[in-house]
Amino acid sequence: MPKQFAEENLPPDIQVIAERMNIVEEKIPPWTAPPLPFDSDCTPLKFLERTRQQLIAPFREQVYGKIPPRCNQTSCKITSEGKAFGGLAIRRQIDIICRHQGMEQILHLLLYIPVAASRPAPVFFGLNFKGNHSTTEDPGVVFHPFIPYPPLIPGSRRWSEFRAGEEGRAMQADRWDFKKVLERGYATATMSYHDVYPDHPLAFNDTIMRFFYTEEQWKSPHRDTGAICAWVWGMQRCIDCLEMQPELDMTRLFVHGHSRLGKTTLWLAANDPRPAWVISSGAGACGDKMMHHYFGENFEWLALWAPHWFRGNFPRLVGQELKIPFDFHYLLAAIAPRRVYIAAGDEDDYADPKGQFASCVAASPAWKLFGGTGLGTRKFPACKEIIGQEIGFYLRHGGHGITPENWNAILDYADRHFR
């Protein structure tokens, strides 16, 4: 078997941990999905009032932690507005100014609104990895300078600076496909997740978490939250701001995220009723895959590389994939009866596409309580086939990413179910 992550020149002690992940299907141990915590006499009202909290509790107590409260003061200021994409859209850039106990954090929201819309437009919203300028070729999008964090392991992209310099304009534009989204009649918005919590173990003092925790509390093994909760908090402040834009139909708010931001988006939707549709791409371990399906990334790998994403007691889950009494189909089920859409790549071994599919199957009974079917099939699909009902699933040929092909499928699903 090829050496895992060999291109990253990992130190030997870390390479050993990499090799403990399983990416051989024949080596997956026997497993069963933990049952959802309700029975045949559960009603929709009982599910919404009680069962949903039972589904959410393991993630609040053992994985992600608590989402911080609102800060003392939030205001939104339009910093620029103009036409974009040859007059197809209005580009609006908004600063969301968050203040708390003498501290301030500014979130930079980029919004495109289709000019041709005859009524308020449904809106896609997701966090980006590299900065707003990296999502588009539009020269009017502002680059926000930053001071890079030092790499903690020279030669490895792990624990390195994720943000793009000014030269990175449009480097991830294909992940957003703004023009296509606008041509189909949808508004679209984004913010860099680094505006809320720069994704680096040394970043605490540049994050919104300093509003609510001391550095000593943050470094404690008893910490009751993590960076994913900070990113959720940032998404919530952006949604607050989007609700103030009269051109948007916020009853059709579609939140989306890829990889760690897929995890973030699912946790947002489980705790916030405002999104009508939740799209997760390649969230994998601790996101949209079944951990009992022991394939791809595991608790140990995430506890090593991303301890700041999770609450302080998260490392207790290391080695417990087959023993935990819950799994991440609980997270999907907590979003019912709203729609969920999972995107996977057939070569994205570390996100485990079959484990993602298994979560969709196991979560489906939650939608049946509301008269739906959930995924509606147990047959793993071929590539380029949108399957499912209230739970949609799409398998793309390729590895870890989101591409224009994904956006074609997402927009087709949106047209089918929200027009």
Image: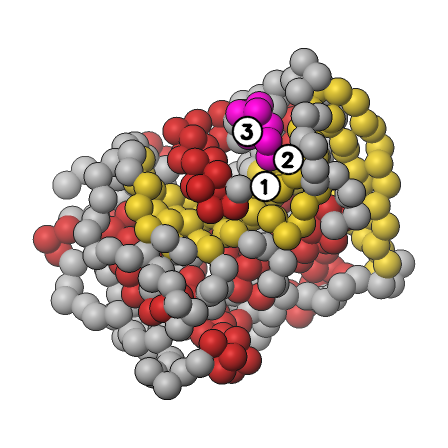
Image quarter for residue 322? bottom left
Left or right, 41 with respect to 181, comes to: left
Residue 163 pos. (x, y %): 60, 34
Q: Read off the residue under disc 2.
A: 187
Q: Residues within 10 Å of mark 1 (few under 14, many from 20)?
A: many
**Rendered-image quadrant of the N terminus:** top left
**Nearest-to-viewer mark from 1 and 3:** 3
Q: What percent of the width, then of the height, locates residue 93?
A: 77, 33
Vertical comparison of 336 with 15: above or below:
below
- Residue 185 sits inside the magenta stretch: yes
Say which label, 2 or 1, has the lower sequence index. 1
**Which residue, as the protein is rendered here, is positioned at the far top?**
86
Q: Is residue 404 left or right of residue 297?
A: right
Q: Which mark is residue 184?
A: 3
Q: Residue at x 64, y 35 (%)?
A: 187
Q: Main secondary structure of the magenta part?
A: helix
Amino acid tagged 1: Phe
Distance in Å between CA atoms under marks 1 and 3 = 12 Å
Closest to the observer, 359 or 251: 251
Q: Position of residue 15 (x, y in %)?
A: 30, 47
Left or right of 364, for residue 22: left
Give how far across and how far down residue 144 sits, in percent. 73, 31
Please tell me which residue is depicted at 15% across the width and 51% down the height of the picture: 25
